[in-house]
Image (cartoon, rainbow, N blue to C red):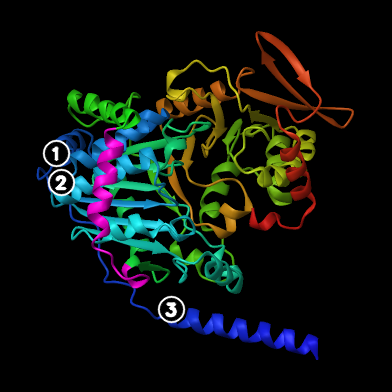
Amino acid sequence: MQILATLLIIALAVIAGVYAWGRFGRRPHGPESSILPLIEDATVLDRFGHPLLLKHAGQNGLSLLSGNVDAFVARALSSRNAGRSLDLQYYYWKNDLTGRLLTREVLDAADRGVRVRLLLDDINAGLHDRMCLALDAHPNIEVRLFNPSRARTDRFKRGVEMVLRAFSATRRMHNKAWIADGRVVITGGRNIGDAYFDAADDSNFHDLDVWMLGPIAEETGAVFDQYWNSQVVLPIGALRTPRAHYLPALRRKLEKRAQSKGGLFYLSQVEKAQAEGGLWHGSRPLHWTAHARIVCDPPEKAHLQKRQNWLMRELLPVLRGARSDVRIISPYFIPGGNGTGELARLVEAKVAVSILTNSLAATDVAAVHGAYANYRKALLKSGVTLFELKADTEDDDPQRMSLFGSRGASLHTKAFIVDERIGFVGSMNFDPRSASLNTEMGVLFEHAGLLAEVRSIFDEETSPINSFRLSLSNDRLRWHDQCEGRARTLKREPEAGFLRRVTAGIIGILPIESQL
């Protein structure tokens, strides 16, 4: 009887959850809207961008944003120069120093009459609705959430809901796009938060974005509209009662952050770039090419249909077409059996395959490393060259250093180059989650100068002072690097503490790889 009673309670809970979710799913999805049409000279970005596009007809201007401070400035300055629209799509937007500074820039733009559409994945927005509700109260700002939870304020209820719809709740929007006036686009690996802009106290990410101008901006805008109007996206106003009184309080908090020591530093960098005039795209050159396009998953990937690897279907033929060289940067790298086989076949075809990922000490997700570790020996035996980024690098590049004293590093770049012919920078990791569960996006491009820059970044990151190169000795892993000017070989996971090693070891034997 006790077992039957327990089963009955579980069944009622599931029925209640499904019923509640069904009612929730019928809530209004908000009116459809689209990217605003371009005008030749209506805004600052139009006046600077349109003549460049006339000069380079049919081409796109692309510039790498490798420096974290540059990446912050590029976003802030494009917001300041926007006069028509800001369309912003992110996996998460943290309520920390740089997150608040960029929120302030977005709010200032809305105050000038700029239409702002902010689309966030709910997995990180949930339980932090106050900022989103405050922004949504502005007449020129609308906030929508991807695959949202109904439980907004109660952690227990949110947890129950996640359990009741465990399969659909794992489907997340991992896209990153910053679109200003439909002219300027920034896409790549960075979310919005201190770790992405060299403002974190402990560890900062090595990451990569692409600043873009040209027809590719319209492509990105079309992708944004597809997500914004998707049935899996809901306005935050359909989830919680609007709170107009939150907005004045948010303004006060944002101004306080802007006057802090860190805030003054970042804003001074924006003002310095603004004084240079023109379209500021960071410290790297702007490359023009007719061969650049946005590749992405559709929002339908989040629906509980059969798994389809839309983006991977675009990228696999590019990788399989390699003839001499493939270099992959992926912070969360779990190739699986099929991926390991694909890489081995490339090596058999005389293609040099090199991969850079995080070491156990550097990764911010030790569980992912546990699954990746299961494939290291097979990859090495097949002839793949493996590098793992150190947590503490000796890189003296000021763009790679935290402005607040920390030299801690963690890889977050997602990129590859093939044969010095074609490259990719985006949000997609080489792991099961990116392939089958998350929606992802990025840019495929062909340009010798741009490829050379990505290759230079790869070479710098994989140098012996910044990364370990792995090898096998009598079927045992070895890590090779350079420390204080001397070569060394290590026989165990370098620099990783006991708890990290145990966590990774346990994850490595659990059957949860598909969720990582």
Q: Is residue 338 left or right of residue 54?
A: right
Q: Which residue corresponds to the image point at 29% horizontal and 72% vertical from the top-left? A: 30
- Is residue 84 something that shows in the picture? no
- Is residue 251 something that shows in the picture? yes
Residue at which label 1 appears:
44
Residue at which label 3 appears:
24
Residue neighbourhood size for the residue with mark 2, other residues' Cα within 10 Å, grouped as few (<14), some (14–19), many (≥20)? many
The magenta segment: 237-259
Residue neighbourhood size for the residue with mark 3, other residues' Cα within 10 Å, grouped as few (<14), some (14–19), many (≥20)? some
**Which sits earlier in the primary sequence, circle 2 or circle 1?**
1
How far apart marks 2 and 1 lie (CA) works out to 7 Å
Is residue 246 magenta-colored? yes
Q: Amino acid at mark 1?
A: Val
Kindly give the residue lying farthest to the bottom in the view shown. 1
Q: Which secondary structure lies at badge 1?
A: helix
Of residue 457 and residue 163, the one placed in the foreground of this image is: 163
Residue at which label 2 appears:
83
Q: Which residue corresponds to the image point at 36% horizontal and 33% vertical from the top-left? A: 71
Q: Is residue 43 left or right of residue 479?
A: left
Q: Residue 413: where, in percent of width, then height?
A: 51, 36
